[in-house]
Image (tube, rainbow, N blue to C red):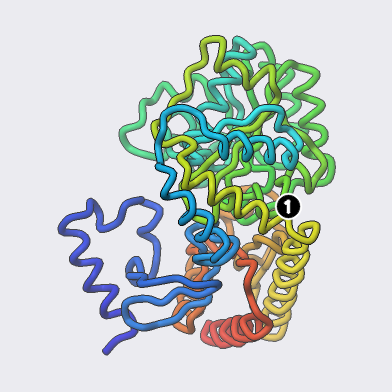
Amino acid sequence: MGRYDTSIARFEEAKKVLAGGVSSNFRYHTMPVPLAIERGEGAYLWDADGNRYIDFVLGNGPAFLGHSPEPVLKAVRESLDQGQAFTTVHKAEIDLAHRLTELIPCAERVRFDVSGTQVDQIAMRLARAHTGRTKVVKFEGHYHGWADNIFASVAPALNEAGPHDAPQVLNQSTGQPENIRDNLVVQPYNNLAVLTDTVNSQAEEIAAIVLEPVACNSGVIAPEPGFLESMRKLCDANGIVLIFDEVITGFRVALGGAQARYGVTPDVAVFAKAVAAGFPLAAIAGKADIMEGVMAGVVHGGTYNGITSSVAACRASVEMLAADNGAIYDKVEKDGQALISGLQEIATRRGLPLHTQGLGQIFSTTFTENPPLLNYRDYKATDDPMRLAFIQGLQNRGIRVTARGTWFMPAVLTDQDITDVLEAADASASDI
């Protein structure tokens, strides 16, 4: 019996009833098919063929505390008897909002939702209402959800992307209207000179600059020193709303998000994924004068916003992360740096152009002769076949990593797990 026989059979069955065999297009790209997972516990997953994996996908980020963390499950169980959707306000929701305003630097007001895509939408709507302008600046390779008006230039082909200093606005899906280009401006990440010129020439039309403060969707690229600080000043000088998309970085790279880690406070920020340990909750937080646009004509809705189970999951997650003055972050940073160093040692010893970069809580592995990666085009120029072969080798040895090379670190790794990962990585490098 083959290692993936049951997963392959399940996928064939799924395609008869689920469009494409999955419930999200971003689940296609696993090898050889989307794995049929049976259960998860801590840092581990087990598939239907009985294979165990040390999991660095973590549901694309939400399971930062590991799969099925008991304090979160306990809080959710206790919430179930209270009911779920009240379509009004409940005390746990208010208490959680109070807690988030204590933790998140930009949070004078908070609202809850259920997905990163949706909080990105309300963030841009609030910015447009606040400024009376329509254009939004985004960065090449950054992802802010799959809605029509922002799903552009996330993974453009380099032969279509245009010049580095003047990227084209490229739709990422058939069915998107072409006129979304009228209100989007795409910029190269980590290039302050280009951004400054763009803002100076179009400031009266620009409502917001939105970005992943760490470019986690294209190589886990940190901001260059001074980039975020200068962007903050540029926005202040021109009346532009600065939006941090912390869907990935929020509650992962620091308890207050990347804004706390880097000491740069946006006007508005959006959160999801690690905020509630896998339960469906997202949040938008920001300055009161912008956020209270919802009382002055800006419409934001959602039947499932703030349901009791997700609020309970978020509150329990936050308290786990905050315990012992955030000691969990020190542990994950240490574990992540151990893996980063170990992987680089393997690359040197094997003579491979394996490049590892990022933060202890989230990093990436690519194959390139020209490190480090500073922007999307650097990431796109890396060796895709070599990366995928390495990741397939890891998966065959029980280590699960995203196809794009991103490693979401679980907070519950053991020293033995780290040893096992590096042994698997060495063997996979040897295959290459």
Check the image and report above or below for 251 versus 244: below
The total of numbered circles placed on residues is 1
User: Picture quarter containing residue 192?
Assistant: top right
10 Å neighbourhood of mark 1: few (<14), some, or many (≥20)? Answer: many
Residue 377 in view in this figure: no
* Residue kind at label 1, given as amino acid type: Ala
Q: Residue at horizontal 67%, vertical 11%?
A: 204
Residue 140 in view in this figure: yes
User: Could you say which is closer to the camera, residue 354 or residue 249?
Assistant: 249
The residue where tag 1 is placed is: 254
Q: Residue at horizontal 40%, vertical 42%?
A: 83
> In x, y percent, where is residue 358?
70, 59
Q: Residue at horizontal 32%, vertical 68%?
A: 33
User: Picture quarter containing residue 167?
Assistant: top right
Identity of the residue furthest to the left in this view:
16
User: Could you say which is closer to the camera, residue 180 or residue 110?
Assistant: 110
Identity of the residue furthest to the front in this view:
81
> In x, y percent, where is residue 105?
76, 37
User: Could you say which is closer to the camera, residue 70 or residue 103?
Assistant: 70
Check the image and report above or below for 386 versus 108: below
Check the image and report above or below for 387 versus 164: below
The N terminus lies in which quarter of the figure? bottom left
> In x, y percent, where is residue 356?
68, 67
User: Picture quarter containing residue 212?
Assistant: top right
Q: Residue at horizontal 65%, vertical 79%?
A: 414
User: Could you say which is closer to the camera, residue 258 or residue 99?
Assistant: 99
> In x, y percent, where is residue 271?
59, 42
